[in-house]
Image (tube, helix red, strand yellow):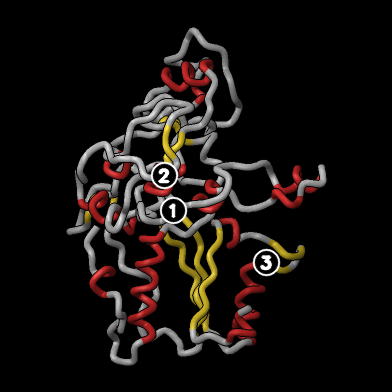
Amino acid sequence: MVENVDPRFALIENVGGFKTGKITKDQSVLDYVKSRFRKLGFETRVMVLQAAEYGVPSLRTRVFILGSKTGFPVDPIPPITHSREGRGGMNCYTTVEQALSDLPSVNAREGVDGGGKYESSPKNQYQKILRMNSNGVYNHVAMNHSPRLVERFSKLLHGSSAYDIGKSGYPNDESVTVYKTNNQRLTPGLPSPCVTANFQSTHVHYRDARTITAREAARLMSFPDSFVFHGKRTQMSGSFLKKYGRDHENHLSQYNQIGNAVPPLLARAIGLQLGILADTDGQANLETQDVLDLEI
């Protein structure tokens, strides 16, 4: 694609394992990409960025490979704006509660897919910005949990997971999973763990006894509320559908779309830095400056 389009810049994003992955025994994925970029006339920079350091209320570290045909007169890594404790004049990390507290409280098997009302007026700047141009709450439908699952979720402490059940603090229950990331109860005063495409089994709401909805996951990824997701909320794996001749059902679900995305606030930070890098005067020339200059 890069070879055919021949852009001035090219940006590739992937998980941390991209840095150590192998194509063959003797060739790494990263070396291959850098070699291909070099043959196409690009200089490259590899950046490992943490989304929470750019205002995203989720801990998400990803690898970005930037190719430039005009070199790097300025550092392509966008300046960090947030830190865990807000030191050095930075903002503190955006938390789960700051991201979700104005959305309607729903129980398992409840919610509305479109046009619902907010729980309250915006409680902070993050909510205010994500609600810009929104016509209501969309994609806010809880999973159809069984009563047994709801009971399990209600016992989870903030920061614990289903892996902890049957261990200290949960003496009357038997262990239910060997996976430490299964059914993690979100901590209201911290960013969430990384939102992945299977967050329906990993992220339990900090207040309600259920896993998070598509809208809540979108909030944790910094998608504006005006961004409405379509298609099924979840779906079976592609390999399963192919095995049983159901390839026609193999489309990205709402959860896939959200969990596999680059968080918009992180994309915004990278875009602004690319604008500076691209401009010969050292200043970004962007028509949407009134939106991009918003402070999160």
Please, is residue 284 above or below residue 113 in the view? below
Tell me how far mark 3 sits from mark 1, CA to CA. 38 Å
Considering depth in this image, is 64 or 198 the residue closer to the camera? Answer: 198
Q: Nearer the viewer, residue 42 or 128?
A: 128
Gap between marks 1 and 2 measured at Cα: 9 Å
Task: Give, as a three-letter code, the residue at label 2.
Answer: Gly
Residue 240 showing in the rendered view:
yes
Q: Residues within 10 Å of mark 1 (few under 14, many from 20)?
A: some
Percent across and percent down for residue 202 are 51, 35
The reply to whether callout 1 and callout 2 are in contact (CB within 8 Å) is yes
Q: Seen in the image, is 275 located left or right of residue 21?
A: left
Image disc number at residue 228: 1
Marks 2/3: CA distance? 45 Å
Is residue 193 among the parts visible in the rendering? no
Residue plotted at (33% across, 59% down): 54
Q: Which residue is mark 2?
A: 114
Mark in the foreground, 1 or 2 = 2
Please give the residue where the numbered disc 3 appears in the rendered image.
28
Residue 118, placed above or below residue 67: above
The amino acid beneath tag 1 is Val
